[in-house]
Image (cartoon, helix red, strand yellow):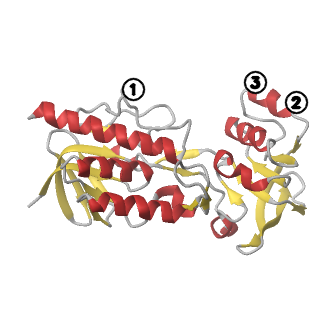
Amino acid sequence: MATERKVVIIGAGCAGLTAALYTARNALEPLILEGASPGGQLMITTEVENYPGFVEGIMGPQLIQTMRDQAERFGAEFIQKDADSLDLSERPFTITAGGETYEAQALIVATGARPNLLGLEAEQRLMGHGVSVCATCDGPFFRDKYLLVIGGGDSAMEEATFLTRFAGRVTIVHRRDELRASKIMQERAMNNPKIDFLWSHVLVDIIGDRETAVTGAKVKDVKTGEVKEVECGGVFLALGHTPNTELVMGQLELDAKGYLVANGRSALTSVEGVFAAGDVTDSRYRQAVTAAGMGCMAALDAQRFLESAE
């Protein structure tokens, strides 16, 4: 027999937790399927200095735990299961997770997005300790350092250009001898005196440990096979992101990049009663505070939808 809920939220990062807080305070008794690894990208982030309200900053996992505790205080229920499948063909929507079935009158999808990585062991080990996937988030921690940016698309050019506000010098490492970024982004990077390029090279290892952070990297010339070591104070991976939309593929409208499409300034998706929040629908900002704002929007939209459906 299915468990019936007014609101089910899939995902427990900043968007999902804010949606949980708002729906719980409005007596909607939300059920949050937080998955086996809840918290989103903040769980691999060390100090967060740009989330409002924390003058001295806060550690990413601590921020997630604080938000979770706040939602629980108002009655939000968390289940540490991944959603396995959805049926959005009719209301109530059906969600299966860990062998259990749940029915929801309204559904909020806040499954986030994952950064594209190279698969190096050092990426995971040093993430948040000299390795980053977000210049906007972490750039100020790298003042006057020599940094590597890995990638050749618009995101790599944007990250590198932003980092020159803080870094002493930035080298873009790209596997080809020409960029795939748009012309305007290429020109912006190439005309920046603090940016240079290491063409036809790939990152094969990152040197450092969690105590001393990154001290260097190993790069390989794809034409000659030669591997050399480069001293640097940080590595930024700018290889794009992949939204976690596999669960809703074929049921909700996605854009060309695979992100959930929301209706205008609302959180409503292509199916009435289903709402999107956070990085799963945001390929532009990808910040904790914008994800939280979207979680608030989704919760309020869900509340109004349920009121109108009564």
Q: Depth check: give the residue in front, 280 or 239.
A: 280
Specify the quadrant of the image occupied by residue 88.
top left
User: Label 2: how many residues lie within 10 Å, few (<14), some (14-19) or many (20+)?
Assistant: few
Residue on which the image places disc 3: 184
Q: Horizontally, is 188 left or right of 24 in the view?
A: right
- Give the alpha-carbon distance from disc 3 to disc 2, as whole Å: 11 Å
**Residue under numbered circle 2:** 191
SS class of the residue under badge 1?
loop
Label 3 – label 1 distance at C-alpha = 28 Å
**Alpha-carbon neighbours of circle 3 within 10 Å: few (<14), some, or many (≥20)?**
few
Left-right relation of 254 to 189: left
**Disc ID at residue 119:** none
* Helix, strand or loop status at disc 3: helix
Q: Amino acid at mark 3?
A: Ile
Name the image quarter holding the C terminus. top left
Q: In the rendered image of this protein, does residue 173 appear above or below residue 310?
A: below
Instruction: Work out whether 76 lies above or below 281.
Output: below
| Identity of the residue drawn at 35% across and 49% down | 247
Which one is nearer the viewer's eye here, 272 or 252? 272
Residue 249 visible here: no
The amino acid type, in three-letter code, at marker 2 is Asn
Taking the spot 80% from the left edge, 29% from the top edge, the residue there is 188
Residue under label 1, please give it.
265
